[in-house]
Every structure is written in structure tokens, then in C-alpha cells.
Amino acid sequence: MNKAFHGGDLTDIQQKYPDAPVPWIDLSTGINPRSYAWVDKISSHDLLEAGQHLPSQKSEQDCLKAYAKYLQLSKNIDHIILAPGSQWFIEKLPREITTDAVYILHPTYTEHARQWYDKGHHVRRFTDINNLPENTANSTLIITNPNNPDGRSFEADLINSLTNRFKYIIIDEAFADLAPSLSFISDNTPENVIILRSFGKFFGLAGIRLGLLYGPPSLIQKLQAQKNLWDISGPSLLIAKTALEDHEWVQQNHQILQDQMGQLHKILVDFGFEIVGKTNLFCLTYHKHADYIVDQLARLGIYVRIFPDHPSWIRFGLPAEEHWPRLMKAFERIKHDL
């Protein structure tokens, strides 16, 4: 399988468009441009302390407990584990799970299929969760909820109806912070359901590299044995704990992101895009002139997410507040030339 294609790395496109104006506006990721302002929330003394010493087990446990409370878990702390990003779990799970086949709802985050395929599993893609094959009792189902890149979401009742049909169900909830009601994590989650969470997207702190997995204690123990010493830095644990406990910021940002996505949605529709799907951090669009639009945006220093398998799709992340005027000016110029 080919190397995965991701957004968020400006190096290649900067080399391809060396004359583009700077700074580049990176709309290729689904990361909150209004990052959690931890610099204003944590004292310099505490941050220095966290950076000067190796992270303790207590600091990781404190962060884990804060994450559990954030997810409204009251008792099953032994069902969760932290790691340096949800990607860590995506890479480890194919080695820890024995399964006849892996069914992956497509299109979705490409690393799921790539990691299972590379580790020798029989990967089968499907597009309709209501049209799954029979005889899957020894197989694994992987869905992303809400889905990336099209924002499709799946209610708990539907997922519950599938738990008896598969050996395991893996749910990637990387964007579930945007719609907490969609999360399948609870104190009563079935033992064969494994759930991944990503801290960096909603809080706008992808560089923190923190992810959480919810699953059966037997799997947690296996994953815990594979973790390196001090693989999550002390500052990362402190920043994440502070953010997860900041309920006022969380509530405010739910509304802010909803409002900003409404603004972006209107701009894209007015331009002439067809909206394929969205969350409050990204909007997937269709346009018959997608190649031309992507090229022109890049010439204007704006990087968007493209999909080699769907050349008419463009995904737009939310711009930072100071970048809205430049984005709108770029759309006006491109629309005039179409």
C-alpha cells in the first residue's frame, strides 16, 4: 500500500510554490485554529517544573483521571490508557488483535487501512454501514465517528446493534469532542469495543501528541507493556490536564467553532462549492474545477486538503481569525477567473 497522504506538512507545497505569499494559511488539517491558551493558564513556575524533571507516574495518572472525568467516566479507569497520540494506538492495534478480516468504513483516515494491511491482515473496505456482509463474527469493524473526511456520524443504537456481529469494533473518535453525544465511551461500553480519542484536534494542540484508548483491561495491559519510559513529556501532561479541566473554555469553544463553521459554510456555498459533509472543524466540498482551485489557492499561499482518490474533493479546515479576510479575497479573485 502506498505511503499515506496527510495534511499538515507545508514542506512539499512550499517547494512546489516557492513564490507564494507568506505566511502560508494552512487549511489542510482539522485542527482548531484557536488553540487552548495554556501559556495564560499555567504558571511559568509549574511549567518549568514540568520541563525540568522526568514525568512521574503521578503526573500521568493525574492527566488520565482528568481525561476520564472529561469523558464522564466514573469508574472504569482501568479501561483507559494514554499514549503519545492516537496514531500510536493505530500502529499498535494490528499487532495485538487476532482477527479473520478487518472491515473499514471508507473513505476515512487512510492510516487505518495502511497499518492493518502492512501487518498482514485481510482488509476489506465498505461504504455503507447498513450493508455489511454476513459471517463476520471473527472479524473486526473499524469506523470513525464522526467520520473524516466527510463528517458522517453514527448513533449509539446503530453501533450497539453491531457489537454482537463482530469480534471487535474499533471506533476512532478523533473528532468526537465536537459532538460529545456521539461518543460511545461510557462505564457500560461492551468489552469488545475499542475507542480512540485524540486530544490535539479540538484543543488545537496537535504538537502535544496525546491520545487515549478505551478498551478491555486485557488489551490495556498489553499496550501498557509496549510503552516506553517517559514517552509523554511532563509539559504535555500538565498542559493536557489543565485544558481538560477547563470546562468554561470547552463550552465556549463549542459555540465558537459552530459559529465559525457556519461562516465558512456560507462562504463556500456562495463560491459555488457543493458541500459533501462537515464537522465544526472541517468542511468537505465538491467542485468540478477542484484542480484549478487548489492550484490557484496554493499560488496565493493557501494550503487545502486534497484527495488523490477523489480529485474533485477539497477539504477546508477553519482559518485562524486573522486569516479570514485573506481567504475571502482569494475566493473573490479565483471566482472572477473561473
Image (cartoon, grey):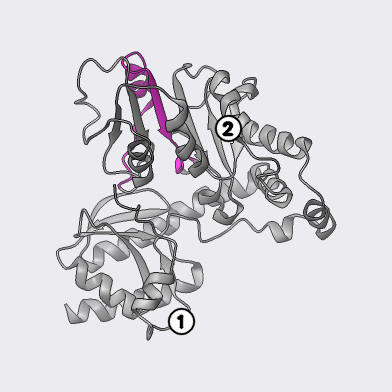
* 228 is higher (above) or lower (below) than 50: above
Residue at the limit of the structure toward the bottom, as seen here: 19
| Mark 1: secondary structure | loop
Q: Quadrant of residue 111?
A: top left
Where is residue 91 drawn, in percent x and y?
46, 39
Q: Can residue 204 be spotted in the picture?
A: no
Mark 2 lies on residue:
71
Report crowding for label 1: few under 14, some 14 to 19, many 20 or more residues within 10 A (C-alpha): few
Is residue 164 magenta-colored? Answer: yes
The segment highlighted magenta reads 150-176
Q: Residue at x 14, y 64 (%)?
A: 288
Left or right of residue 269, residue 303 in this image: right
* 182 is higher (above) or lower (below) than 39: above
Identify which amino acid the numbered label 1 is placed on: Val
Disc nearer the start of the sequence (2/1): 1
Q: Can residue 230 be spotted in the picture?
A: yes
Left or right of residue 187, residue 304 in this image: left
Identify which amino acid the numbered label 2 is placed on: Leu
Where is residue 260 drawn, in percent x and y?
43, 59
Observer-side mark, 2 or 1, equals: 1
Residue 22, numbered label: 1
